[in-house]
Amino acid sequence: MENFTVYNPTKVLFGTGIIKSLGTETKSYGSKALLVYGKGSVKKYGYYDQVVDQLKQSGIEIVEYEGIKPNPILEDVEAASALGRKEAVDVVVAVGGGSVIDSAKIIALGIANNENTWDYMTQKKKPEITLPLIAILTLAATGTEMNAAAVVQNHATGEKIGYAHPLNFPKASFLDPSFTITVPANYTAFGIVDLIAHALELYFGKGDASLTDRITFSIIQDAMDWGPKLLSDLSNVEMRANIMLDAMAALNGITAYGKQSGDWGVHMLGHEMSLLFDTPHGASLSIVYPAWLKVHKEIIPDRIIKLGTALFGVDNVDATISGLEDFFKQIGSPIRLSEINIDATMANDMLKQYKNNEINGVNLPLAAHYQKLIELML
Amino acid sequence: MENFTVYNPTKVLFGTGIIKSLGTETKSYGSKALLVYGKGSVKKYGYYDQVVDQLKQSGIEIVEYEGIKPNPILEDVEAASALGRKEAVDVVVAVGGGSVIDSAKIIALGIANNENTWDYMTQKKKPEITLPLIAILTLAATGTEMNAAAVVQNHATGEKIGYAHPLNFPKASFLDPSFTITVPANYTAFGIVDLIAHALELYFGKGDASLTDRITFSIIQDAMDWGPKLLSDLSNVEMRANIMLDAMAALNGITAYGKQSGDWGVHMLGHEMSLLFDTPHGASLSIVYPAWLKVHKEIIPDRIIKLGTALFGVDNVDATISGLEDFFKQIGSPIRLSEINIDATMANDMLKQYKNNEINGVNLPLAAHYQKLIELML
């Protein structure tokens, strides 16, 4: 076991109807909120109205920034920050999935610090303060609702990078599973892939604690049990609740007990794919993970087999990888680039981009293997 | 799944040598500390010296309160509070096991509020503030290092009660497994019983989430794997680390996801036993739990069998209870009152005490069953 630190001050309010506490909770952080959301679904399905009602009932003045994109971009973060500063808001309220909440974390930093937010994301500057953030989650996937990470892409520099800082923890997150029942089958599946990838990346990171392995397997098994059931009963709130809990637990720190770090190579390559081809995040991960395991099968066979034994009752690396591929196929997430119409030439662009980031100093743990990795993804 | 809230702001610093960060961490909360500890072992084994060295290196002035008892009593809490107020300390630093850290939580409340602390514990008054608490753990057992609960006994009123409040969370807890290698076999075993009891009491509480059941089984399985190994190799720091992690996880909130509450009947009856006979806390629990399960075997058979299947691969209630009894026996913790020389007459005092508390309004979920329960414990 490695030495480690646990710290997660986010208050999570979980359950159907929990939105009724939003006004009171937000009011304790201020009386003027910047409300950040995406491009339509929160309005279409009435979540926006519920949020606005709750805030207004508590007398909170609202300034709105609409239009955060599914793969969130720096331009929106900067524009929303500027708006928040101009309007002197006290608190940021984000309604949406990972893209909206990740953006809101950086928007809050930008408002409080009046700086170019990319300087924080690239670690050129270290923030001392931020604005309080209240998150209302509408997609079970990234775990952003209960962690300190945010991923944003910058088209100007050709980077999609993650940034973690304790100031990024939301003050409170509202997880109402009924807010996720309108997520279509494909994005529901991508969310399940994402949460499994998080659990796996911690599992393959440095350090081991037997309890943490058990917890990790618990989360993946739970998602593998509920996932297919939910996909054939998308409006089932109880099933949504279980997957929502799995996603929260997969990246809220409990899979990192006894760990120094995760191995984020799969996510990083997935980010390259999203940056170049706008691939949905979860879809990129179900393509990268099997290839990543194949590249690592001779390097960490015991670790892969331990996973396979726990999840599928198998005793070898190949059966473990097949088990994972079969599950991704079963829930309808792609496992090869060809399924999303990316050919070898396009994949090479991903490779160039990946190398370019390496040159730019981004930590790429898989650099030695990426050529092979991309071949295995085709 | 029930609606639930997750909130746990304690920062845990875990690992061998982690004490080196104590001064810096404490300094961020103040420059004068009340150092609270027990009756000798922290001095005997040098933990006290390490703590004092670290605090002094950071220029922190120390006021000491020595002598917290293994079943902590209100008199010590009140006296330490009075000392802390008189000396106007900024922060409380506690070095010890559950008794010391639990006491320190209430001492911190007492210092900040200048009130009779029992009024808080009995919920007559609601605190608004407390003093920051830094905990250094020397016994893996209660989970107090990362939760909001504290148990103190009051001989004047004949009560040993638990009190949970968000203000009770330590600001930071230092979990160095090497600080636990001097714990003798019996208290090591009692700690393992205590952590398993915590996991079980959450498991048998109201609400169910499949992930949470899996996490609960993970913690118990991990403790059942490491426990016997550790007991034959008490100075093994890596084994100590694993049990320390299990104890932290068993009551830091992750076994309460999707739950409205735990069922604390076993702990409450155990507290009666400790109050009357000074029984070590863990020893009381290994006696009460088998009886509790026997009383509940026809009320919640499915839940008990699910546990037995996960832990012992069995498919009936009796085999589940035997499995648990066998484990407690294996690690040397008593499973009957006769083993600790308590006969039927003495047990009846426990019953009287228990009824008395019921009359006093303490919530006793097992009240309907306690006569039968005590018979089964003899």
Image: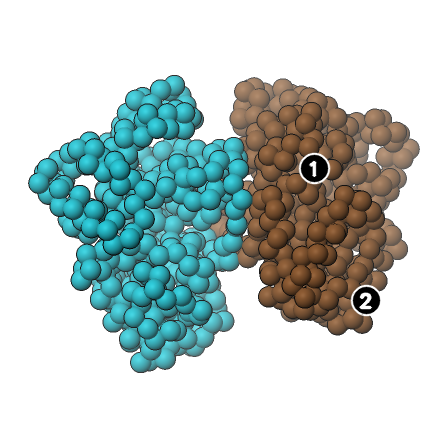
Chain colours: A cyan, B brown
In the rendered image, residue B326, in percent from the top left (x then y), is placed at 69, 21
Q: Secondary structure at mark 1?
A: loop
Q: Which residue is at 15% across, 49% downward?
A: A277
Q: Which residue is at 28% across, 25% downward?
A: A322
Specify whether residue B344 is in view: no
The CA distance from mark 1 to mark 2 is: 31 Å
Q: Secondary structure at mark 2?
A: helix
Q: Which of the chains bears the disc numbered 2? A: B
In the rendered image, residue A94, in percent from the top left (x then y), is placed at 35, 63
Have a look at marks 1 and 2 and say if they share a chain. yes
Q: Residue furthest right?
A: B345
Say which of B69 and B46 sits in front: B46
Say which of B131 and B301 sits in front: B131
Q: Residues within 10 Å of mark 2 (few under 14, many from 20)?
A: some
Q: Earlier in the sequence, mark 1 or mark 2?
A: 2
Q: Residues within 10 Å of mark 1 (few under 14, many from 20)?
A: many
Viewer-nearest of discs 1 and 2:
1
In the rendered image, residue A205, in percent from the top left (x then y), is placed at 41, 39
The quadrant in which the C terminus of chain B is found is top right
Q: Which of the chains bears the disc numbered 1? A: B
Specify whether residue A196 is in view: yes
Query: Mark number for residue B359?
Result: none
In the rendered image, residue A300, in percent from the top left (x then y), is placed at 37, 28
Query: Mark number for residue B83?
Result: 2
Residue B244, compared with residue B87, is above or below; it is above
Query: Mark number for residue B181?
Result: 1
